[in-house]
Image: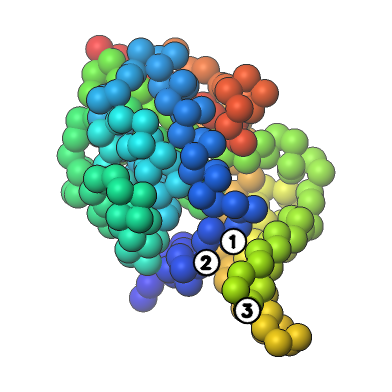
Amino acid sequence: MTDPVTAFYDDLADEYDLILEDWDAAVRRQAPQLAALLASMGLRPPATVLDCTCGIGTQAIGLAMEGFAVQGTDLSPGAVARARREATRYGVDVPFAVADVRALAEVVPGPFDAVLSFDNALAHLLDDGDLRRAVAAMVEATRPGGVVAASTRDYDVLAGERPTATPVRRHLGEGAERASFQLWDWADDGASYRMEQVVLRGADGSWEGSGTVTTLRALRRAELEAAFASAGLVDLRRHEPAEIGFHQPVLVGRRPD
């Protein structure tokens, strides 16, 4: 039986870029932001980076363009296949492999100078044990003195507001039009929510739609920090979007020497 998170991203892989207003612009915008963040921690090209929840390659491709030696892994074979195509289109050499973030050593033993998980990927780990196993695996893949970094949505704010949908993103193409948005249904305790990614496709005045569903944990700052600390990371620091320009807060920790 296919893991439900894997199924979600396999279903979404070919249209994942619709989540963003302009995916290519996001790749180019985020690359220098993340390169600057790594530089602030003493890591500059050609430092080695493992993007262990790479999706279709948004950050992995951008960091390779900045000169880092990047390896990408993801749970979803569909996302990995798309990432390989996108890397070829961008003309960068990034090896991609299918791997569960909780068991990285089985595929990419490392060590790497930095191990990253961005774009809210860790929020799929609903259980504390799974979250801690994932962070521990990230630390294991990091060299002594290296860094681990993760970005999530700011659930300390969102769990209070409990938004029910995201804005519609509309994409025009040759003879066709597509639109995407998310519907969020919160659990009564605010600890998680059911998310449906909806994609509408329009042509010749008519529309058809599809949706794919997953459940996400409203991962609070203190919970992620506790997982980092439990895995032995030190010098924990949270970087806010206003500070680094990246669209989500980023928590960084260092593996002791």
Q: Is residue 119 above or below residue 183?
A: above
Mark 1 or mark 3, which is nearer the start of the sequence? 1
| Camera sees residue 238 | yes
Q: Residue visible at 37% across and 42% down? A: 60
Q: Amino acid at mark 1?
A: Leu
Mark 3 burial class by Cα count in 10 Å: few <14, some 14-19, many 20+? few
Mark 3 or mark 2, which is nearer the start of the sequence? 2
Q: CA distance from mark 3 to mark 1?
A: 17 Å
Q: CA distance from mark 1 to mark 2?
A: 6 Å
Q: 130 or 142: which is nearer to us?
A: 142
Q: Secondary structure at mark 3?
A: loop
User: Viewed as shown, does residue 198 lie left or right of 105?
Assistant: right
Give the labeled residue for mark 1. 18
Find residue 43 and report its image quarter.
top left
Give the labeled residue for mark 3. 175
Horizontal and vertical percent position of residue 228: 44, 27
Q: Residue visible at 37% across and 44% down? A: 61
Give the labeled residue for mark 2. 15
Mark 2 burial class by Cα count in 10 Å: few <14, some 14-19, many 20+? some
Horizontal and vertical percent position of residue 53: 40, 47
Q: What colour scheme has been applied to the protein in the rendered image? A: rainbow
Q: CA distance from mark 2 to mark 3?
A: 17 Å
Q: Are marks 1 and 2 in contact (CB under 8 Å)?
A: yes
| Camera sees residue 228 | no
